[in-house]
Image: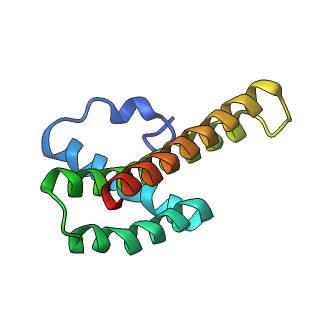
Amino acid sequence: MDDSTDASGLKGRRGLARILRAGGYSLAGLRAAFIGEAAFRQLLLLNLLLLPVAFLLDVSRAERALLILVLLLTLVIELLNSAIEAVVDRISLELHPLSKRAKDMGSAAQLVGLVMVVVVWGCVLL
């Protein structure tokens, strides 16, 4: 196997080369999520709408940080949810109770994240 198909060849990298490669992989992941996941694009739009609002509100720094962090958390959860779905689909597209459970739990995590957004924004604004 060459380096393009064998992940073990990437494990020994150190220093700046490792950081640059990791940054490239992160950007590739963000790009894949943006292109392939409608839910990620929708959450990104929500973030683009509400993040500026968080800076315009007359709130404390701690409140502003919470408003921003819960929004960013929804993106993190969606990236992890999409990764779970991709791995499950990679293993098999066959309908299986464990596959359904994994995908449902990822979706539930996103629901909890969105509830957190509503609760935090509601508490700060009301």
Q: Position of residue 99 (x, y in %)?
A: 74, 31
Query: Looking at the picture, does residue 80 appear above or below residue 35?
Result: above
The foreground one among 5 and 103 is: 103
Can residue 101 be seen?
A: yes
Query: Looking at the picture, does residue 8 appear above or below residue 24?
Result: above
Q: How many marks?
A: 0
Q: Position of residue 101 (x, y in %)?
A: 72, 29
Query: Coloured how?
Result: rainbow
Can residue 78 be seen?
A: no
The foreground one among 22 and 77 is: 77
Query: Looking at the picture, does residue 100 appear above or below residue 124?
Result: above
Q: Quadrant of residue 94 in the image?
A: top right
The foreground one among 36 and 55 is: 55
Left or right for 105, reference 68: right
Q: Tell which residue pokes out farthest to the right in this image.
A: 95
Quadrant including the C terminus: bottom left
Left or right for 107, reference 95: left
Q: Position of residue 118 (x, y in %)?
A: 47, 54
Query: Looking at the picture, does residue 64 appear above or below residue 56?
Result: above
Q: Position of residue 8 (x, y in %)?
A: 40, 29
Q: Tell which residue pokes out farthest to the top in this image.
A: 98
Q: Quadrant of residue 98 in the image?
A: top right
Left or right for 85, reference 117: right
